[in-house]
DNA sequence: AGCACATGTTTTTTT
DNA sequence: AACATGTGCT
């Protein structure tokens, strides 16, 4: 493609962005306004028009998938794959630190700790320090540490807020946590960013080198960078000022992870000479979808007005559906999907189903399976989170870096080797007294006090096993290594002994893992153990999502960022689920939830369904929900309501249906899940008690203008028809 | 040390 | 409802 063609089909704002050459630029890109397009075209244009060397371009994306796509598109434009670095902040930092780790006192074979590794380590520490009580959850501490690191606060700089118990614990735990990470030669996600920043501030020459190397910096999703990422980009770009950032403040949804929306809002302050470009034409969605999304986001107080418009025609109304229960919700979605594919010419692959929490996927999955609808879940119970996979991975990690304590503790006695807690206690004490890793300790077991010869032999055998595996890794491939792990540990036998009914599934997972490794070996440039381990940690599930085959795609609203579908279902539009009840007290968090809603709605090109259920099961027991406030915020003039009656989808005039739904929202506090309301919201299967007829079960519910007609079968076998609002019924659980 | 059974906890989102 | 942890027994 020649240079002219790179910019030929862009609108004037997009063109201005692509043609921006040197100096800072901020592109405020509304949803669907073609920002990926702008980024890829600009990379191509820098190379083809300005003769910029491809390897001096650094493009940072939010996911690895986005990175792959970007590389692909640039390659199409240029006719060859550019040698630019395109990847996430984390993968960039990891790559850089592999080269420079020694300067910071780490080995270049460091392993990366994910959230569950972190929690496990913190738990260990709490136990060792006798701080283990019900007020200090590893989860909460892990999150506090992560926040501190995102703000570049190191253990020695950490000051505990007065009077807060957890903060006092933090003061103890954080330095110890960091010490143990280092002893394991491990970095957590936040360390990747923090340590890179540290490297740049302590080693002027290193910083200069990378500044020179990457003369052009492009950052996507800038509204979601945290302070460490912000600093990292400053280190790289402050001097030459060639920093080109793209983002949309209305789509900032990672505040919980330290993302700081002020970074994008302050860009013009950081770079007063910045060129600011607004992309406000939406090429993705029909106008009614945009109208609906904008009427919701307009309720956020802390935001700048923005005008987003579309020429794609009005499209059809947003469809709002209220169902009686979680399973009815799933049934509604299934029937609606059937209608879309059978009568309206959509494919399964055109349809995305989004929810707030991963746990919501299960109910949908059950019904899809029954209805024989093809689906794929992105994220959720991640493959690499499964127990048997984690075990094998722990062996691989130990082979790569035997000092890794988390992996060591995971498999030292898995499968059982007769090394119990007492023995381990002695090993730990010895290791921490001598300042060596657990692996180093068991390599010379005769030094460990209190260990009898028999136990010395057992731990020694484990050390020898690791050495043997290391040898296999040196001689052979990754595939050989995994095979050796399975053989040497008799792992499959262990699974069969322990898992009973689940054994088959677990073994299949292990087989699947071996397939993945073979696949990886074929695709990777240098298929080594280290790269493989890194990829497993840094590549998200959405990155592996297969969009080529024809199936429904289910994922969380967060994972859906950056994607688009002709048809979107947003399920679980219930107050307490979305916005999630955990944010009830904080206006800021509510606004983040609202942005999340905006992100979800703007994924839709043609059709948008927003679905709720009046009652759901949660932790076993049942609970009632009112409509999400976000549903009430949608401009009523673009809504049509649908219902499911006896397995058939019915459509209702919008105003009536909406009013009926809203009236449910009156009454006690918005979040209160009213346990025993006496009228309305019954569904089939509910158990009730009547003062005269005794206990019974509801066998059908029919809507009457403002009420429900219930048919109840009581314990003595008689059936009664009762009006919900008049009958003195009590709910039973 | 390891098993079987009982109890408690979880579900907010992710690189 | 699903899973991790704890207890008591062998």
Image: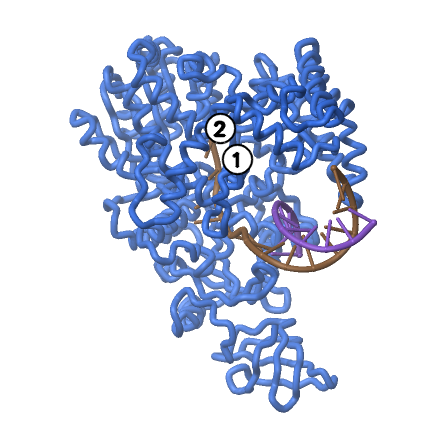
Chain colours: A blue, B brown, C purple
Q: Position of residue A417 (x, y in %)?
A: 74, 31
Viewer-nearest residue: A10 or A272: A272
The answer to whether any part of residue A542 appears in the image is no
Viewer-nearest residue: A473 or A479: A473
Say which residue appears at 54% left-offset and 28% top-offset.
A537
Give the residue pinned by disc 2: A180
Query: Where on the picture, by quarter, is residue A74?
Result: top left
Query: Where on the picture, by quarter, is residue A222?
Result: top left
The answer to whether any part of residue A185 appears in the image is yes
Viewer-nearest residue: A659 or A381: A381
Of the numbered discs 2 and 1, the one sitting upstream in the chain is 1
Q: Is residue A632 left or right of residue A678?
A: left
Outermost front residue: A450
Outermost bottom residue: A692
Say which residue appears at 61% left-offset and 86% top-offset.
A690
Which chain letter matches label 1? A
Marker disc for residue A235? none
Q: Identify the secondary structure beneath mark 2.
A: helix
Q: Image quadrant for the C terminus of chain A?
A: bottom right
Q: State yes or no: discs 2 and 1 in contact (Cβ < 8 Å).
A: yes
Measure how far apart labels 2 and 1 are at the Cα level: 8 Å
Outermost left residue: A272
Q: Position of residue A175 (x, y in %)?
A: 41, 32
Marker disc for residue A121? 1
Q: Position of residue A121 (x, y in %)?
A: 52, 35
Which chain letter matches label 2? A
Say which residue appears at 49% left-offset and 52% top-offset.
A134
Viewer-nearest residue: A682 or A320: A682
2 and 1 marks on the same chain: yes
Q: Position of residue A58 (x, y in %)?
A: 37, 18
The local crowd at label 2, few if under 14, some if 14 to 19, many if 20 or more residues have their Cα within 10 Å, is many
């Amino acid at each position: 493609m020649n240079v002219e063609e790179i910019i030929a089909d862009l609108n004037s704002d997009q063109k201005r962005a692509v043609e921006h050459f040197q100096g800072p630029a901020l592109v405020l890109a509304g949803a669907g306004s073609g920002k990926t397009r702008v980024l890829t075209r600009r990379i191509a244009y820098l190379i083809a028009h300005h003769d910029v060397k491809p390897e001096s371009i650094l493009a940072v994306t939010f996911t690895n998938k986005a990175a792959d796509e970007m590389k692909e598109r640039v390659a199409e434009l240029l006719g060859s794959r550019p040698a630019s670095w395109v990847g996430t902040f984390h993968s960039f930092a990891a790559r850089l630190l592999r080269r420079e780790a020694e300067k910071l006192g780490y080995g270049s074979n460091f392993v990366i700790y994910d959230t569950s590794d972190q929690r496990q380590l913190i738990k260990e520490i709490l136990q060792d320090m006798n701080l283990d009580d019900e007020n200090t959850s590893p989860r909460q501490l892990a999150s506090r540490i992560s926040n501190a690191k995102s703000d570049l606060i190191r253990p020695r700089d950490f000051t505990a807020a007065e009077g807060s118990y957890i903060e006092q614990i933090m003061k103890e735990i954080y330095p110890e946590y960091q010490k143990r990470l280092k002893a394991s030669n491990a970095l957590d996600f936040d360390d990747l960013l923090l340590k890179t920043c540290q490297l740049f501030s302590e080693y002027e020459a290193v910083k200069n080198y990378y500044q020179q190397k990457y003369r052009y910096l492009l950052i996507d999703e800038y509204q979601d960078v945290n302070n460490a990422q912000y600093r990292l980009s400053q280190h790289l770009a402050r001097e030459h000022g060639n920093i080109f950032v793209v983002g949309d403040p209305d789509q900032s949804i990672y505040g919980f992870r330290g993302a700081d929306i002020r970074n994008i809002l302050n860009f013009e302050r950081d770079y007063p000479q910045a060129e600011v470009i607004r992309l406000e034409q939406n090429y993705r969605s029909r106008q009614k979808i945009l109208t609906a999304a904008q009427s919701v986001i307009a309720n956020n107080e802390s935001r700048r007005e923005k005008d987003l418009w579309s020429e794609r025609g009005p499209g059809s109304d947003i469809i709002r559906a209220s169902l009686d229960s979680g399973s009815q919700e799933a049934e509604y979605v299934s029937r609606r999907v059937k209608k879309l594919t059978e009568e309206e010419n959509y494919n399964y692959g055109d349809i995305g189903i989004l929810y707030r929490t991963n746990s919501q996927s299960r109910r949908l999955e059950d019904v899809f399976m029954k209805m024989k609808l093809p689906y794929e879940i992105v994220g959720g119970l991640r493959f690499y989170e499964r127990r048997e996979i984690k075990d094998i991975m722990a062996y691989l990690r130990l082979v790569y870096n035997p000092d890794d304590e988390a992996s060591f503790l995971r498999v030292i006695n898995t499968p059982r080797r007769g090394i119990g807690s007492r023995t381990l206690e002695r090993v730990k004490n010895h290791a921490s007294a001598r300042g060596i890793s657990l692996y180093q300790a068991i390599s010379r077991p005769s030094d460990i006090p209190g260990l009898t010869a028999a136990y010395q032999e057992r731990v020694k055998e484990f050390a020898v096993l690791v050495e043997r595996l290391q040898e296999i890794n040196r001689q052979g491939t990754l595939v050989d290594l995994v095979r050796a792990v399975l053989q040497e540990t008799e792992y499959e036998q262990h699974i069969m002994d322990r898992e009973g009914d689940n054994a088959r599934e677990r073994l299949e997972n292990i087989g699947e893992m071996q397939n993945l490794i073979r696949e990886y070996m074929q695709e990777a440039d240098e298929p080594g153990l280290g790269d493989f381990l890194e990829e497993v940690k840094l590549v998200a599930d959405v990155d592996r999502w297969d969009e080529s085959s024809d199936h429904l795609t289910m994922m969380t609203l967060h994972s859906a960022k950056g994607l688009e579908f002709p048809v979107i279902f947003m399920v679980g539009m219930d107050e307490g689920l979305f916005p999630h009840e955990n944010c009830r007290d904080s206006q800021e968090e509510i606004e983040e939830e609202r942005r999340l809603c905006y992100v979800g709605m703007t994924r839709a090109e043609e059709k948008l369904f927003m679905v709720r259920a009046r009652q759901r099961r949660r932790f076993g027991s049942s609970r009632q929900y009112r409509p999400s406030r976000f549903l009430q915020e949608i401009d009523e003039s673009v809504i049509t309501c649908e219902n499911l009656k006896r397995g058939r989808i019915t459509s209702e005039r919008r105003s009536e249906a909406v009013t009926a739904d809203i009236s449910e929202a009156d009454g006690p506090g918005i979040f209160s899940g009213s346990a025993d309301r006496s009228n309305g919201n019954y569904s089939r299967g509910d158990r009730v008690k009547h003062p005269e007829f005794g206990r019974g079960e509801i066998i059908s519910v029919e809507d009457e203008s403002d009420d429900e007609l219930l048919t109840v079968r009581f314990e003595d076998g008689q059936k009664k028809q009762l009006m919900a609002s008049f009958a003195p019924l009590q709910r039973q659980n």
